[in-house]
Amino acid sequence: MQPVKVVVVGAGVVGLSTAVCIAESLSHCSVTVIGETFSPDTVSDGAAGILFASQFPGIPLERQRRWFKDSIDHLLAIAQSPICAETGVFLSSGCQVFKEVPVDTRPYWAEYVLGFRTLTDQEMKRFPHHKFGQAFTTVKCECTTYLPWLQKRFLKAGGEIQQGKVSDLHHLADTYDVIVNCSGLGALSLAGDTAVYPVRGQILKFHAPWVKNFIRDGDGLTYIYPGVNSLTLGGTRQAGNWSLEVSAADREGILERCFRLDPSLRSGQVVGEWVGLRPSRENPRLEVEQLRTAGGREVPVVHNYGHGGWGVTLAWGAALDALGLVRQALYRHPPRARL
Ligand SMILES: Cc1cc2nc3c(=O)[nH]c(=O)nc-3n(C[C@H](O)[C@H](O)[C@H](O)COP(=O)(O)OP(=O)(O)OC[C@H]3O[C@@H](n4cnc5c(N)ncnc54)[C@H](O)[C@@H]3O)c2cc1C
Ligand SMILES: *[C@@H]1O[C@H](CO)[C@@H](O)[C@H](O)[C@H]1NC(C)=O
């Protein structure tokens, strides 16, 4: 019997996670990843990769919980195993502080990270500009190490990798039985999905090896994340801005805000800079659509894109969800019946 041919468009953290889940679970499928760029040249590679999330307005909370829980369970298991170093996935402890007490003092993901608690008045003295804080241990997933590891895992499961730009998903429908669309911001032109937009993020790589714990301002704009080789200091959130140029004004703003949060950083040094465009959407798109080719062939397209500032956090959970959609689509429309 011919294998069912699945193609995944996109080799960022969402595409590779989805490709691994399909290749390892559906043994009757042959899976190909097509990416215009690969690690270290995807948006995922620049992400700090810290796991927690905000809530999307239009997706049932139960589904978002499942994405988060499946992701962090997968990454916690790696972080607490001997492959931690080769995957770039490790535990990270720290706190999130708020200038005003938030309406919701316990986010939905509080039960999935480790040791979530409210900061004491004593601890808050360190943050004179803030009124409320939370401490917890989560995972940091550094994609410049994690993506090459996922790629190897995918090849080991029999997957194939191709470099190239897909200009129209219809072209793929002549060759493949299922198309999975993990093209991030590329979905704007590829899917003609105008609900996808960039949210520009600039960050600094910073040398201050005495800083061991992360600090994030609850407004999401200012953060200090210790990593394997340096700290990541951020950031900016500029919706609709396509500029990939490093901005000196943004750099100064980031430094000023981070120094306020942790004055010890004043004795550190900037060692790198990066700008990335978060593939944002009011809600990520994770659903099936039927594509009809000129020849009348119907091919399911599973969309998995638009995770915005939380793609690393949600990738594995979203990949398992997408795997379920691929399975369902194949069950409802077995490709042999279509030929
Ligand atoms: C400054 C910054 C900090 C961040 N920090 C975090 C964080 O701490 N935690 C977190 O969870 N997230 C974070 N993010 C968000 C995270 O980076 C994204 O959500 C995530 O990378 C999205 O992954 P992706 O696979 O969808 O997209 P990408 O990594 O952009 O991958 C898209 C892939 O699709 C390919 N592609 C696109 N169009 C086509 C086409 N037409 N043909 C072929 N291939 C195509 C691309 O080449 C690429 O391989 C951060 C983002 C930024 C910018
Ligand atoms: C985009 O961001 C850069 C850097 O912050 C800024 O200089 C520029 O004015 C912004 N462009 C738009 C259109 O907002």
Image: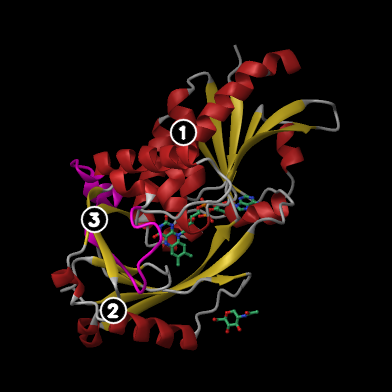
**Mark 2 → mark 3, Cα distance in angstroms:** 18 Å
Residue placed most toward the observer, 125 or 321: 125
- Identify the element where label 3 is drawn: strand
Decide if residue 326 is on the left or right side of residue 119: right
Where does label 3 land, which residue?
136
Observer-side mark, 1 or 3, equals: 3
- Whether residue 159 is visible here, answered yes or no, is no
Q: Amino acid at mark 3?
A: Phe
| Numbered circles on residues, count | 3
Where does label 1 land, which residue?
320
Q: Amino acid at mark 1?
A: Leu
- Earlier residue among tags 2 and 3: 3
Above or below, comparing residue 126 to residue 176 in the picture = below
Residue range corresponding to the magenta coloring: 79-106
Place residue 333 in its image quadrant: top right
Where does label 2 land, which residue?
261
Place residue 253 in its image quadrant: bottom left
- Identify the element where label 1 is drawn: helix
Above or below, comparing residue 184 to residue 225 in the picture = above
Are there few (<14), some (14-19), or many (20+) residues within 10 Å of tag 1?
A: many
Point out the image quarter for the C terminus: top right
Residue beneath the point at 48% across and 20% down:
27
Observer-side mark, 1 or 2, equals: 2
Residue beneath the point at 71% across and 52% down:
193
Residue beneath the point at 71% across and 48% down:
191
- Identify the element where label 2 is drawn: helix
Above or below, comparing residue 210 to residue 76 in the picture = below
Q: Residue 330's spot in the image, x, y percent?
A: 62, 21
**Mark 1 near mark 3, Cβ–Cβ under 8 Å?**
no
* Picture quadrant of ligand 2: bottom right
